[in-house]
Image: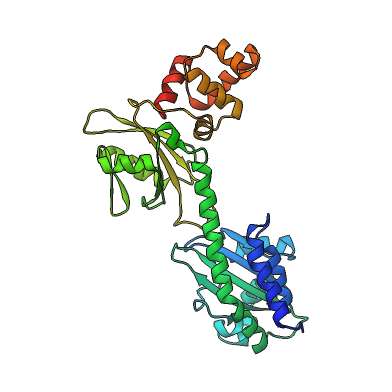
Amino acid sequence: MAKRDQDGFSALLEALYGGLLQQAPWEPFLRALAAWLDATYATLILTAPGMTTPGTILTPGAPTVTADEYAESFFASDPFKGLPEGKVTAFAEFLGGEAARDSDFYRDFLAAAGGDQILGVDLRFESGFEARLRATRDRSLPDFGSAEREAFQAIVPHLRHAIGLFERLQVSGAEHGVYRGTVEQMGVAAIILNRDGRVVRTNVVADRLLEAGDGLTLADCRLRLKDGAQRKELEALLKSLDANPAPQRFRIARASGRDLAAIAKPIAAPAFMRGGAALALFVSDPGQEAQLEPEAIRDLFQLTRMEANLAVALASGRSLVDAADALGIAHNTARSHLRSIFAKTGARRQSQLVHLLHGGVQ
């Protein structure tokens, strides 16, 4: 058995917290945990209620076929789930004794899970997702005892904190992807919604727009559109994010008589994070002029850096020839970039592109 001293526990915590920022988070910790518990494998599953396939499942060192078989054939019907929150539990104890290993189903399940015996703990989070940590041993090793269970339980509070940090990092990364370049510089309101229509985050421009209450408002942390048909359109969009991840354009009617223009852009986030950021709304008033910044244009329309610089130069009133000279590129190169800009923005003419950029999102 491995010696479980303070130095070993410190190394396990270092692998837990230090791994969060690595290219493959969790793998160093899971390998260290398996060694700490004298287990064959350690597995982490991140999922949400009702999912038929795991959002994330990691079992470092296990044969790929084993992990695939569990995910495809046993995840949805896994009998070893819904454990007492935060309490390390043994498979045989949870299923009613050693006889649980004797049926064909459980033998097949244990084989797919990577071992003949399992210790597990389930952690549930307010945002709606669940973390399941499992340690498995094959038949060549003795059963887990009280020492292993106590050692496993000691890591649970740290695991809870680490997964909470991981969730925050994932949410921040997803939100940063749509805020980078700050569309505020274009006078564009940015509103981040979750799948339930609750507002997760807004920028300064959005705050001003919501306070005005002309066309859209905030009530009980939910975005409300004045027009009933447009409200239903937004609700349908939130329900179809997985089936239709493409950006959608629509208009928002206002009592003042001048519609707002909007682009709804789904936010790519891990499948288990159902309660986090899901949709970014970029809303602008076509009647307002704003200072154009290449980085903001680049992020909003997914342009290259040179395409964004050219688009801003054209929007400032330069001709294509003058813009090419100012940017130090050939006229033919500028024409090629312009064709790509048209394809990405949906504009068909240079004048339409200029109008689109000054309107923010026509």
Residue 270 x, y percent position in the rendering: 54, 53
- Residue 148 sits in quarter: bottom right
Could one spot residue 163 in this view of the protein? yes
Quarter of the image where the C terminus is located: top left
> In the displayed structure, does residue 167 sit left or right of residue 63?
left
Residue 293 x, y percent position in the rendering: 50, 30
Say how many tags the image has.
0
Point out the residue furthest to the left here. 255
- Which residue corresponds to the image point at 49% horizontal and 76% vertical from the top-left? 85
Residue 336 x, y percent position in the rendering: 61, 17
* Above or below, comparing residue 146 to residue 352 in the picture: below
- Which residue corresponds to the image point at 61% horizontal and 63% vertical from the top-left? 73
Scheme by which the image is coloured: rainbow
Quarter of the image where the N terminus is located: bottom right
Front residue (pair 209, 361): 209
* Above or below, comparing residue 343 to residue 153 in the picture: above
Front residue (pair 329, 253): 329
* Above or below, comparing residue 96 to residue 347 in the picture: below
- Which residue corresponds to the image point at 46% horizontal and 55% vertical from the top-left? 276
Front residue (pair 157, 88): 157
Residue 2 x, y percent position in the rendering: 76, 82
> In the displayed structure, does residue 219 sit left or right of residue 89?
left
Could one spot residue 225 in this view of the protein? no
